[in-house]
Image (cartoon, grey):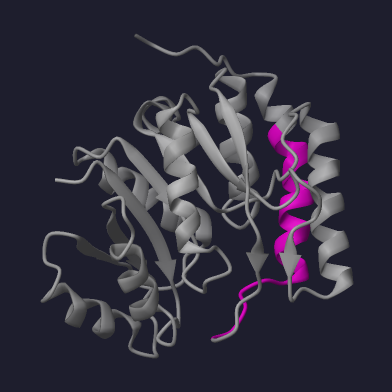
Amino acid sequence: MSKNLVIIPTFNEKENVEKMVLKVFSLKTTFHVLVVEDNSPDGTADIVKSLQKKYPDQLHIHERKGKLGLGTAYIAGFKWALQKDYDYIFEMDCDFSHNPDDLEKLYEAATKGADVAIGSRYISGINVVNWPLGRVLMSYFASMYVRIVTGMKIMDTTAGFKCYRRKVLETINFEGIKLIGYGFQIEMKFTAHKFGFNIVEVPIVFTDRIEGTSKMSGGIFNEALWGVLKMKMRSWFRKYVIEE
């Protein structure tokens, strides 16, 4: 059995999901895939189930009743992974904005000592393709804002392309993670940071989706920005001690 699990949340990803799964399975390193499917009306789940006939051991699906938020999708995936024997748990989007080839880079960083390996758009300049300038600036300065509020040294604080070592997810109390949109990505990094885990950024190039519809909105960024202040204040009343 592979020790690596890639969690891919989906909602209306019929144009991308088969190509993504097959690409991940073609990589040199063996990865399993868990698709967390939020009841897409476009038939995404049917495509995954059809692929399962060919890849019964590598491909898994967790179906939910509706679109319940990115954070809850990943937490559902994390809980599923921890019930199995996976040592490295990855997050990535289905739309190819995250290059599946870069899973190898994240895996290498994790095997060399990173507790959390982040696919970073900003660790070596600004590496974003097909985004309008306004969105690039919004994302870049949002990360700067998060660094100021939290004290983290991470350049890409909102990144959603990551690898966690199992012990990180075993340590974090998911019930204490309150942000469910893209702020979830910030809160998970901040919590890992507070516990003292080794967080490493790996340079990637982020390419905006070509097929399908973007889930990004101004409201998502507002949730992240205001939520960061609340997250920081909550941290003053918590103890970050790893239990042996």
Quadrant assignment for the C terminus: top left
Of the pair 190 and 52, the residue shown nearer to us: 52
Q: Is residue 127 magenta?
A: no
Q: How many marks?
A: 0
- Locate residue 105 relative to residue 29 in the image: left or right: right
Q: Main secondary structure of the magenta part?
A: helix
- Locate residue 104 relative to residue 77 in the image: left or right: right
x and y percent of residue 12 in the render? 45, 83
Indicate whether 232 appears above or below 133.
above
Indicate whether 24 appears above or below 202.
below
x and y percent of residue 93 in the render? 50, 64
Report whether residue 177 is seen.
no
Quadrant assignment for the N terminus: top left
x and y percent of residue 176 in the render? 51, 34
Report whether residue 43 is seen.
yes
Range of residues picked out in magenta: 212-231
Farthest residue to the front: give it: 28
x and y percent of residue 236 in the render? 70, 19
Q: In the picture, residue 190 is in which quadrant? A: top right
- Locate residue 219 relative to residue 27 in the image: left or right: right
Of the pair 144 and 226, the residue shown nearer to us: 144
Indicate whether 103 appears above or below 97.
above
Residue at 40% of width from left, 73% of height from top?
Answer: 66
Residue at 57% of width from left, 17% of height from top?
Answer: 196
Residue at 73% of width from left, 31% of height from top?
Answer: 232
Q: Is residue 219 magenta?
A: yes
Farthest residue to the top: give it: 244
Farthest residue to the bottom: give it: 42
